[in-house]
Image (tube, rainbow, N blue to C red):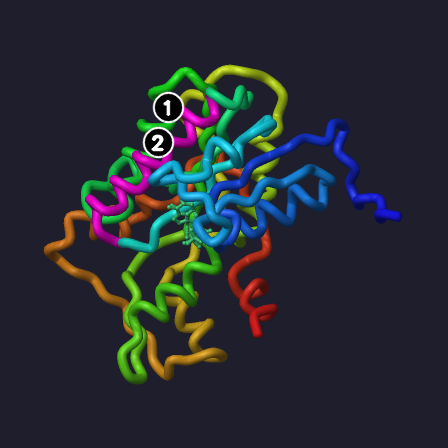
Amino acid sequence: MNATPATAPTTRKKIAVAGATGRLGRHVVDVLEEQGHDVVAISRAQGVDIVTGDGLAEALHGVEVVIDSAGTPSPDQQVATDFFTSAARNLRAAGEKAGVARIAAVSIIGIEASVVGYNAAKPAHEHALLEGALPVRILRAAQFHEFVPQLLAWGTQGDTGCVPRMGTQLVAARSVAEALVGLALEEGSGTATAPFPEIAGPREESLVGAATAYAAVHGPATVQGVSDPADPERDLFENGGLLPGPHATLAGPAFEEWAEGVN
Ligand SMILES: NC(=O)c1ccc[n+]([C@@H]2O[C@H](COP(=O)([O-])OP(=O)(O)OC[C@H]3O[C@@H](n4cnc5c(N)ncnc54)[C@H](OP(=O)(O)O)[C@@H]3O)[C@@H](O)[C@H]2O)c1
């Protein structure tokens, strides 16, 4: 006999999660399953490609809501823009054909001011989602706690890890997943308009400070903050442009508390 879910949903729904194996997506899947929903996990590892559209129509058969938590690791603006805009158009088109009620997607706090690199691809992602007939809800999140080890892995040479100087209100991917599922399953129709809801951690941190605390346990030996005067986004990164607005939901755990649980 199946165990009764801890929190039984009022209505059990079939929900597709794009990017189901990612830093965020795996938590979205967990939250939905804990609530007793049926999850259709979408990623290339599961044989569904949201950029080419391969397998997408079949995956969305009978799905009521799509949650888009997919992403590309590419920092290249054109590559990331192509990824997010193709994925958005394919999810919208396949979602409309399948008769889904809405798409809920995750974006990044403050990215409307971005002009280069990965971040500049996210406004294009938002626009590509919003330009169709299918209702869309967008949650803007702060940088994830889980992003700190990733940045250190990318930026470490020898004993030194380089991370950008940045003011951020780091948030656990699990907390973002809970908020995203809540937004996706809220009753009601229509596309949400700006200002989009925001989710961030409980307090402002310096990325260098968080990376230094993490590295003290997991390495590398030293962490260095990098700041490029030629970077057109330096101001945005260093002067609070990525911090949440007054309407944001703030959710724990704080970075240090989260980091204590990492092996
Ligand atoms: N990381 C952060 O700090 C942060 C902060 C705020 C918002 N966000 C946003 O959150 C979202 C998820 O970020 P993340 O860090 O969780 O990403 P991630 O860990 O890189 O995961 C990406 C997911 O997308 C899937 N994917 C990639 N290409 C795909 C394709 N062509 N078709 C189907 N699935 C594909 C991946 O699986 P396969 O490789 O198997 O396909 C994986 O499941 C992104 O939109 C990002 O902009 C991230």
Q: Main secondary structure of the magenta part?
A: helix
Q: Amino acid at mark 1?
A: Leu
* Relative vertical location of residue 34 with respect to residue 260 in this rendering, above or below: above
Is residue 76 a member of the stretch shown in magenta?
A: yes
Image quadrant in which the C terminus is located: bottom right
Which residue in the structure is indicated by mark 2? 126
Can residue 25 be seen here? Answer: yes
Q: Is residue 202 visible?
A: no
**Residue 205, how many percent across, how many down?**
42, 58
Local crowd at mark 2 within 10 Å, few (<14), some, or many (≥20)?
many
Q: Say above or below: 62 vs 4.
A: above
Q: Is residue 95 magenta?
A: yes
Question: What is the secondary structure assignment of the residue under circle 1?
Answer: helix
Q: Is residue 1 left or right of residue 107?
A: right
Residue extent of the magenta highlight: 75-96
Horizontally, residue 122 falls left or right of residue 102, namely left
> Which residue is pictured at 31% across the width and 44% down the height?
241
Which three-letter amino acid code belongs to the residue tagged 2? Glu
Q: Where 61 falls versus 227 (above or below)? A: above
**Residue at 68 percent of width and 44 percent of height:** 33
Is residue 23 left or right of 212 when viewed as pictured?
right
Going 67% across and 38% down the picture, which residue do you hit?
A: 38
Q: Give the residue number, with chain letter if any, for mark 1.
A: 130
